[in-house]
Amino acid sequence: MTKSLVIVESPTKAKTITKFLGKDFKVESSFGHVRDLPQKELGVDVEHNFEPKYVVPLKAKNIVSKLEKLAAKVDNVILATDEDREGEAIAWHLANILNLDDKNSERITFHEITKKAIDEALAHPRHLDINLIDAQQARRILDRLVGYKLSPLLWKKVTKGLSAGRVQSVAVRIIVDREREIEKFKKDEYWTIDATLEKDKQNFVAQLNKENGKPVGKLGIKDEKHAQSVLDNLKDADYVVENIERKETIKATPTPFTTSTLQQEAARKLGFSAKQTMMLAQRLYEGIELGSEGSVGLITYMRTDSLNLSSFSLENIRTYIKDKIGQDYLPVSAKIYKTKSKGAQEAHEAIRPTDIFHTPDELATYLEPRQLRLYKLIWQRTLASQMQPAIMDSTIVEIKANDYTFQAVGSIVKFDGFMKIYKAVVKENILPALKEADKLDLIKLDKLQHFTQPPARYTEATLIKALEKNGIGRPSTYAPTLSTIQERNYVVKDEEKKLRPTEIGVIVTDLLVEHFPQIVDLNFTASVENELDDIAEGKMKWQKVISEFYNPFAKLLKEKEKEINKKEITEEKTDIKCDKCGSPMVIKLGRFGKFLACSNYPECKNTRPLFETKEESAAEETNEKCPKCGNALKVKTGRFGKFLACSNYPECKFTKNIQKPTGVKCPKCGEGDVVVKRSKRGKIFFACNRYPDCDYATWENPNAPKKIKEE
């Protein structure tokens, strides 16, 4: 008879663990959460200390029934869910459903799914940590109160289908604020002067950096007139080396991966979204079939903000570096990194391979291509974190020409260090052999016009970095937050994978900033995260945190129900007449932006896209004829940019996408050109313009910078 039932969250994890345990153990999966707040009601008793009402979702009922039957047949139930707060809460829900107590159950945690880790966990079981459970309960209840109370208000005062969230609304605000910075940005013109010089038949470029002994700042030369005067003053000038400074610079080793840095680097090097990265990492953690070895967990737990590496793993990493890479690359002692993340406690170790001797080449036949690329990134970064730093030799040369000084900077890699295994962006610039008083030949002198650039739009990677920097969210929340704000159409990705707010995203953000400033305040949201950390450490009671937030929030909600006028937000009068009943049309706001609707609603339900009339006069007529009726096609603007439409609308409703070229020939057929297209859900992709004759399509921008290739 089986003596112990081990319960984990996923069937893959269950399969991996099973091979480490004997016949006295049966491992089963709960398939995630087995209890949650109800979907169709608030589920929180705000009148009685915020007592939550938990129910078993329909999809979990069969699983729960199976676990109840199995638990009744064993002496002991071992709860082996993940070691973070969410995993602790799942274990607690299982204990409640299965009527477990300290006599007939144990709680174990492990950071990696290996025999050593499982044996260690079984040897040291513990009780459920009520503080971690309360912290997770507080997060869930807070998010339910905000979402369940605020979303209906948005439906009522703006449009149906909207939602608000404690973290998601702040993330959207960060993107909206950046877009406003870009819109307000005024570019400044400036010029630079470059001299291409020669010594011993080797050319190099030096840039003007001093005029009359004074530094020329970035905006020092503001117009072409000033730039031309510099060129005029340099006619017939001699270029002489005035000073040479040589110095050695150290390029520090990268830290091991945390959740946020893994998501950022996977986006930068591999082009993965945060959601994609976490999905792949989950599979690597839970276990991959490695032939005769069976299912093997390849990486440690992927939701962590710790930089710690276990002493056992450090020994193996250092052995690998010494034996496989070289003694010169091994520091005298292991590198210990201190976690800078505030309240870091989600897990006890950074993300690393469970066995550094499982090389990417060895696993190539077992992993899917994307899994292999992510594993390789983690494997290389882990090794790099324990290698010697890279050493650069830098040379700064000052060159005198009349009253001007030019500067050239050369750099070479003296010792590659960690870069031998983990490529970093380092551009070498080799200068000729120079010494002071050397006379140089001028090849050419260029004046170059530039303009200051606005701040860049966020990518998923840089937004995660901003969220982490501001203390908003925790490792488990980054990926779902980014997915949510895109799925709900508050934010879209452009061709360069930059995040732009949609019209509805801006409107909802502005409403929240004006009427519910606390909800979208970065400092407030970060302070709530700190309070959740305090709950997890047993320093605060979760009900107090909820109460301090909810009571003023509920009062404000009642006030805003009366104060906010829907028409002021969602309607705008126009001079356009309804083509069905002749009544004036108004601009209204829908889930996907603004549109025209008859003011005589509900008697007349006529609606029209806003751009078909508001921008009619600005629509650019083309020489292209409508294939349906023969009238001219016009360039119009819609939710996803410009498109072609028949000028005989509404009699003819023909539309056609404008193909935006990329300048790249189709790699499949060689005849067509790759153009920018948009899917039905609004996602950018790139495809051959000869479709359907050629079906080439890709999500990757052919003009995007190539990802750094890992060796």
Image (cartoon, rainbow, N blue to C red):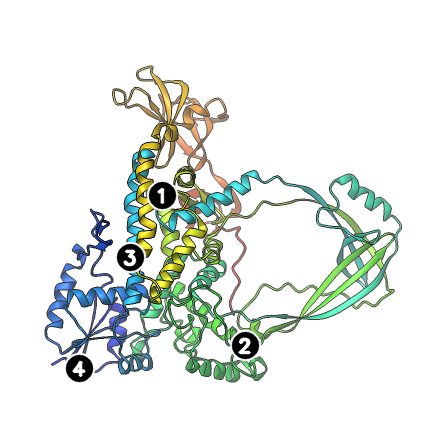
Which quadrant of the structure image shows residue 293? bottom left
Looking at the picture, which amino acid does disc 1 mark? Answer: Arg
Residue situated in front as seen by the camera: 211 or 711: 211
Residue 131 in the image: state x and y as whole percent: 30, 66
The residue beneath circle 1 is: 681
Q: Is residue 701 left or right of residue 588?
A: right
Residue 188, labelled with which disc?
A: none
What crowding class fits label 1: few (fewer than 14 Cα within 10 Å), some (14-19), or many (20 or more)? few
**Residue at mark 3 to residue at mark 2: CA–CA distance:** 47 Å
Q: Is residue 489 left or right of residue 231?
A: left
Residue 693 in the image: state x and y as whole percent: 40, 44
Residue drawn at x 43%, y 58% as measured from the top left: 272
What crowding class fits label 3: few (fewer than 14 Cα within 10 Å), some (14-19), or many (20 or more)? some
Residue 220 in the image: state x and y as whole percent: 74, 46
**Residue at mark 3 to residue at mark 4: CA–CA distance:** 41 Å
Looking at the picture, which amino acid does disc 3 mark? Answer: Gln
The residue beneath circle 3 is: 543
- Quadrant of the rendering where the N terminus is positioned: bottom left
The residue beneath circle 4 is: 24
Q: Are marks 3 and 4 in contact (CB under 8 Å)?
A: no
Residue 387, labelled with which disc?
A: 2
First in residue order: circle 3 vs circle 2: 2
Q: Secondary structure at mark 4?
A: loop
Q: Is residue 583 left or right of residue 506?
A: left
